[in-house]
Image (cartoon, helix red, strand yellow):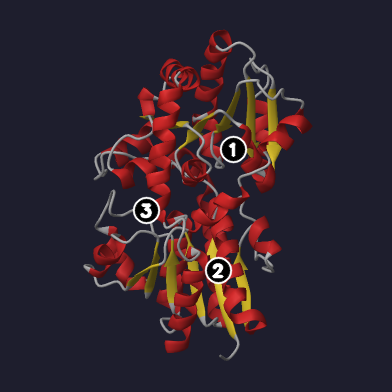
Amino acid sequence: MKSVTIMLVCGEPSGDALGAQLMAGLKTLAGDRVRFVGVGGIAMEREGLKSLFPLDATAVMGLSEVVPAIPAILRRVKQAVDFAVETKPDAVVVIDSPDFTHRVARAIRKRDPSIPIGDYVAPQVWASRAYRAKAMAQYFDLVLALFPFEVPFFEKYGLKAVFVGHPVVERAARMVGGDVLRARLGIAAGAPLLALLPGSRTSEIRFILPAFKDAVDLLAKRIPGLVTVLPTVPHVAAKVRVATQDWATPLHIVEGEADKYAAFNAADVALAASGTVTAELALSRTPMVVAYKLGAITYALSRWMMLVKHFTLINILLEREAVPEFLQERASPQTLADAVAHLFADEAARGAQVAAMNEFAGLLGEKEEPPSLRAARVLLDFVEKR
């Protein structure tokens, strides 16, 4: 195989983690014959990417966050597109964050239709706004699909898709070290420990973390000796520390992937914002309660477009509420506190979740070939055939 240059573009930390796994898979198959350029974060930089710019301006969601950031986002889009058009990589692969990455893909296709473009972690258009799949077929040549049912869905709209599996399953083996983390942080082995995952976007810290804080206030009165641990990421860490002042329980804020996974392993229960992290928690077999809150206008505009009954990935795939989920006004501090307290108190409820998580892991292909390696193979084949 000749040497190839692949441009990867992600917009936030979850995409950065997926991009890093894809890069590792590509290096396993192609070694130093593959060169990486584009946009990524800490994880992708560890794999050898020199990012065109940091992710701080692009990791936003919701009207109240996106609108003020539009000028900065558009500058970043132009920067990425200019780079692609000038350097002509063998392929561009955008990863998740469609509000940002699809703008990049559309603009590249418009300015230079000869550049092949793929989408890794396509938006869940099968869950809402299915009409977007038809538009995607105009500027993507390939979708690396995480779920088997996505292949016939996208191909119905004329967009080639190949099932590769969900790369989050590859992280399960790293979700260890809970006892070591407890010891390092001075948390007693038997102390009830709640992991809090309020999200990695500024908008999530704004809308979700306050509800989690108020829920912990209530839980502190119901669960003697409760301790909380909150994994976060660098670009929102300062905001998290400001928002968690006057906390009702001992609180440990940790950064870094190893400490995040160790926190999952150490925790008895988790309270999490919906997103990739809920799949990670499921793979760590950590019982959880899931919540999500948006700005009122954003929620009002998006609510009517929802096509699925659930919004948490494990519930969507299992087609039942395997873990309790609460959206918008239902995600009140009292409701969240009640659901978390129930998990702490009820061993059978925790066991039922773990059984569902085992089922979920099987659907994601936990014991099959690593999905990022499959994705890398499909991508290299796609490049060679082009």
Q: Helix or strand or loop: what does disc 2 sit on?
A: strand
Q: Residue furthest bottom?
A: 2
Residue named by callout 1:
264
**In this view of the protein, can residue 5 be seen by the observer?**
yes
Residue named by callout 2:
8
* Left or right placement of residue 149 versus residue 163 in this view: left
Q: Which numbered dot is residue 363?
A: 3
Ranked by sequence position, the earlier of labels 3 and 1 is 1
Q: Which numbered dot is residue 91?
A: none
Q: Helix or strand or loop: what does disc 1 sit on?
A: helix
Give the residue at x 31% y 73%. 160
Give the residue at x 61% y 38%. 265
Residue 385 position, x and y percent, is: 42, 88
Q: Give the position of the C terminus as an image quadrant.
A: bottom left
Q: Are marks 1 and 2 in contact (CB under 8 Å)?
A: no
Give the residue at x 59% y 69%. 23
Q: Amino acid at mark 1?
A: Phe
Q: Residue 244's image quarter?
A: top right
Neighbourhood count class around disc 2 (C-alpha, 10 Å): few under 14, some 14–19, many 20 upward? many
Q: Give the position of the N terminus as an image quadrant.
A: bottom right
